[in-house]
Amino acid sequence: MEIKKTTNTEAMVLELTGRLDTVTSPGLQTALSEAIQSSDAVVLHFTGIEYVSSAGLRVLLQGQKIAQGAGKNMNLKNVSPEVMEVFDVTGFTGILTFI
């Protein structure tokens, strides 16, 4: 998975490409932690994500909890229908914020 970081006036943007799985989730965990610490809002662009495993879901859940605990926002954007189905089945649509 590739992670491209950019900052705009509203948020730190992490543009993700590839698979979010056991191998790649530690990299997202690090990038997400850094983004939450350095910005009031984080947007994860999922346009290039084709697969999310349980390890990826765990990282997203941790990120959401850390962001909420710090009074910050974490949003997912441009999630494909296939990946959104994973979020629906696992109940993550009620936990994560999609824009």
Image: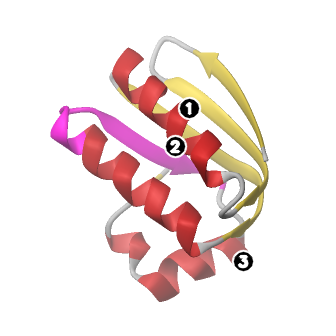
**Magenta stretch bounds:** 68-78
In the picture, measured across the screen, residue 20 lies left or right of residue 65, that is right
- Give the residue number, with chain letter if any, for mark 2: 29
Disc 1 to disc 3, C-alpha distance: 24 Å
| Residue ID at (47%, 23%) | 11
The residue tagged with tag 2: helix, strand or loop?
A: helix
Tag count: 3
Crowd around label 1: few <14 · some 14–19 · many ≥20 (10 Å): some
Crowd around label 3: few <14 · some 14–19 · many ≥20 (10 Å): few
Residue type marked 1: Ala
Residue type marked 2: Gln
Residue 28's quadrant in the figure? top right
Mark closer to the chain start, 2 or 3: 2
| Residue ID at (46%, 24%) | 34
Q: Position of residue 40 (x, y in %)?
A: 33, 22
- Give the residue number, with chain letter if any, for mark 3: 82
Disc 1 to disc 2, C-alpha distance: 6 Å
Q: Which mark is residue 89?
A: none
| Residue ID at (39%, 46%) | 63
- Choose between 75 and 22: the one closer to the eye: 22
Crowd around label 2: few <14 · some 14–19 · many ≥20 (10 Å): some
- Give the residue number, with chain letter if any, for mark 1: 31
Mark closer to the chain start, 1 or 3: 1
Mark 1 vs 2: CB contact within 8 A: yes
Q: Position of residue 21 (x, y in %)?
A: 68, 63
| Residue ID at (36%, 53%) | 62
Q: Is residue 39 visible?
A: no
The residue tagged with tag 3: helix, strand or loop?
A: helix
Disc 2 to disc 3, C-alpha distance: 22 Å
Q: Position of residue 91 (x, y in %)?
A: 39, 81
